[in-house]
Image: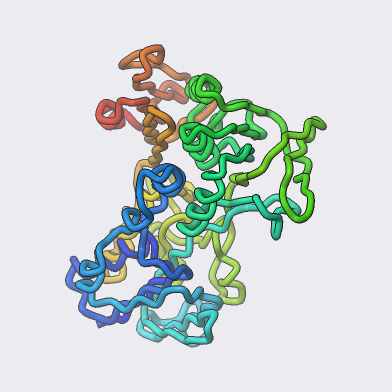
Amino acid sequence: MTDVLIVGASAGGLAVAEALRRKGHQGGLTLLGAEPHPPYDRPPLSKQVLSGAWQSERAHLRAEAQLAELGAEFVLGDPAVRLAPAAGQVASAAAAAHEVVTASGRTLRAEAVVLATGLTPSRLPGQDGLAGVHVLRTLDDALALRAHLLDGPRLVVVGEGVLGAEVAATAREMGLDVTLVGLGRAVLADLIGDPAATLLTRLHAERGVRLRLGVGVESLASEGGRVTGVRLASGELLPADAVVVAIGSRPATAWLDGSGLPVGDGVECDARLRAADGVYAVGDLASWHHETLDRRLRLENRTNAVEQAQVVAANILGEERAYTPIPYFWTDQYDVKIQAHGFLSRDAEVEVVEGDPEQNRFVALYRLGGEVAGVLGWNMAKAARLHRQALT
């Protein structure tokens, strides 16, 4: 009975633990989390938790009794700082014990280790230690930002990707003065292509968000240790009492320095999400070889983390399954729910096949070289799932 140590106690890590138990694993099971909170869901942080529609406890993934039924040890609030693969060799036998050292000095050992430490938000120069500047990655980040937004500050959101757009939408619905800044010419253009991104950009403008797109940030203005504005590369100074920096994230791999694991854009795994004998990765951290596409991928969304967890659990138990998903993500902004399946390239030919963009609900197919590469549903989730069958 192999002991399993899961480093990262969020959705992906918890899903690995639950899948192992469902499959009959009776060995030792430990979840190590950097945060003091029990496993919680991240997507609601920029929406329901930030707006106050949910109390923070509602974001918890399982009740305390359900976690207890796992028969797992939860070590929370103690980040991993070092991984020592078994016998000091990455290619060592899976039966030997790997070691993970935590910030408190604790050493945890297991025959199988699953890496699920997620992402670290990118930051602007000069933002650290400056009051009023926020990132949004953790539950505590969301609660701190909400407390600030309740004061009704002028908010500048830097970053026109999914997180920045969701924060801007939530803040506008809370009645705040919001400006959205980004290098892209439209909101989410790199993720959903120009036609849909143009519609989403128009929606933000109609809902009262001031848009400063296609321009970078030069610096943060401050006085007395508190942010007072955002200076753009164009020279314009945007007054701000609060700033959210949502300019992307990078895989949280710094603690793996010296481990010998292959680390590039995330932990580099094979098609079975294995980084080394007895070492696996799931979620935002994992870069893996997609056998069907014959390319390396790294996906940042909750669905991917949970689906990868099922494959990792199976492989720990000897099933040898490859992970070959159709990429997927979703976002909710205002009254719009967007689901994206496959690859929504900006070079694709886009055709609306159901609904009508002017009626705020439609399905669009994205074709490359005459073949369907992506499907987007705009307030038509069920229809989009049906059309994903056309993906090649």
Q: Nearer the viewer, residue 258 or 43?
A: 43
Residue 238, x across and y down, in percent:
73, 34
* Quarter of image, res 378: top left
Q: Is residue 353 left or right of residue 151?
A: left
Residue at x 39% of width, y 38% of height: 330
| Above-or-below relation of 95 to 146 | below
Residue at x 35% of width, y 48% of height: 54
Residue 143, x across and y down, in percent:
48, 54
Residue 149, x across and y down, in percent:
54, 44
Residue at x 48% of width, y 86% of height: 106
Q: Is residue 247 left or right of residue 298?
A: right
Q: Nearer the viewer, residue 57 or 352?
A: 57
Q: Nearer the viewer, residue 128 or 72?
A: 128
| Above-or-below relation of 97 to 24 | below
* Quarter of image, res 6: bottom left
Residue 322 in sight here: no
Residue at x 70% of width, y 50% of height: 124
Residue 294, x across and y down, in percent:
44, 46
* Quarter of image, res 381: top left
